[in-house]
Amino acid sequence: MIKKKNNFSFYLIIGILCFPFIVNVIMVLFGQLPNSYEFMFANDLGNKEWLSFNNIHNYNIYVLPGEPIGVKGKIIAYRNLRRQMLLTRPDCLIIFSLGLAEIGVFVAKTVCVPTILSERVDPKYLPQSKIHRLLKLLVYHFCDGIVFQTVQVKQYFSKSIQKKSIVIQNPIMDDNLPVANDNSAEKEIVAVGRLSIEKNYKLLIRAFAELNIPEYRLKIFGKGPLFNELSDLIDSLRMNDKIILEGSVDRVVDFIRNSDIFVLSSNHEGMPNALIEAMAMGLEIGRASCRERVYLYRFFFRRG
C-alpha cells in the first residue's frame, strides 16, 4: 500500500472491457503521484486477470462478486460497492466504466465522496438504447467532474456538462517505442484491437479478400468474443494462408514495426491507443469509412 501522511486516497472503478484502453492513463496517475497517494480498485467481472501491469500488487484491489447485469445484479453491486467505500472512505472516486458508472456515482453521493467520470467511447454511438442514454445523462448530471478524450466529444454534450469537464488526450507511455522501418517493410497489413463488433473486422477481412493482393498478408492482433466467427469467415473465404488472427501479444508495437500498412476499420472509436502508437512509430495509416451495407475501401495506402 502506498501511503501519505495526510493519506489522500483515490478509488478507481474500472470496467473489464475498458481496461485495455486505460492502462496508459492509470500509469500516468501512478507516475505523477509516486509514493504519495493511496489507490484502491474495483472491477466488474469478478476476476483479477486484468490486473497485470507494473506495480499493481502495491495497491488494494476489490473485485465485485458477480456481474452487475440486470436489476438484481446492479442492486448487489451497489450494496457491495457502498460497503467497500464506507470501509475505505476514499477522498475521490474515479470511474472508467459505463456499466458501473450509475452505480458508482449514486454510491458516492450517499457516502459524500466527489466523483470524476472518464468518458472512453464515442457518445454518438454508445450507449445505443434510449433508456441507457437518459441514464448516462443523469449520471453526468450528478458527477462532480468529467474527463473527455477529445474536444469533439466534449462539444457533443450540453453547456452545463461542458462547464464541469476537461479534455485530456490519451498519452503514449512507451519510452522505447520503435520506429517503423521504411527500408525493410514487409508486405503486411496489420490491425490491432479487441475482436468485437465495433471494430468491424468482417469488413476488413472481406475487403482484403476481394481486393486479392497476392503479395500481402493481413494480420489482426487482439482477442475477443468474435474470434470463432472471424475464423469461420476466413475459412469460408479460403484465406487461411493470407489472413491471420494473431491473438494477444506483449508489446504489439514490436510485432508491427516492420509492417507496411496499419488499418483502423472500426465503426466508431473513442481515442484509439493503437492508432496513436502506430502514427507515432511512423507507420502509414489507413482508415475505413463505412455505412450499413456499403463498403468504401479507402484504407490501403503504401508507405511513402
Image (spheres, rainbow, N blue to C red):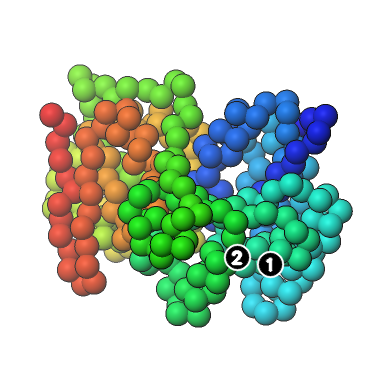
- Residue beneath disc 1: 106
In the picture shown, does residue 279 fall above or below 114?
above
> The N terminus is located in which quarter?
top right
SS at circle 1: helix
Residue at image location 63% in from the left, 46% down from the top? 50
Q: Position of residue 56 (x, y in %)?
A: 69, 36
Give the residue type at disc 1: Phe
- Residue beneath disc 2: 142
Q: Is residue 216 toward the left or the right of residue 150 in the image?
A: left
Residue at image location 76% in from the left, 71% down from the top? 76
SS at circle 2: helix
Q: Is residue 156 toward the left or the right of residue 22 in the image?
A: left
Q: Which residue extends farthest right?
A: 87
Q: Is residue 280 toward the left or the right of residue 224 in the image?
A: left
Are there few (<14), some (14-19), or many (20+) residues within 10 Å of tag 1?
some
Query: What's the mark number on residue 187?
Result: none
Q: Could one spot residue 294 in this view of the protein?
A: yes
Q: Count every numbered label the image shows and give the total.
A: 2
Front in this rendered view, residue 25 or 217: 25
Q: CA distance from mark 2 to mark 1?
A: 8 Å
In the picture shown, does residue 213 fall above or below 159?
above
Give the residue type at disc 2: Phe
Front in this rendered view, residue 45 or 4: 4
Residue at image location 49% in from the left, 43% down from the top? 248
Q: Are marks 2 and 1 in contact (CB under 8 Å)?
A: yes
> The C terminus is located in which quarter?
top left
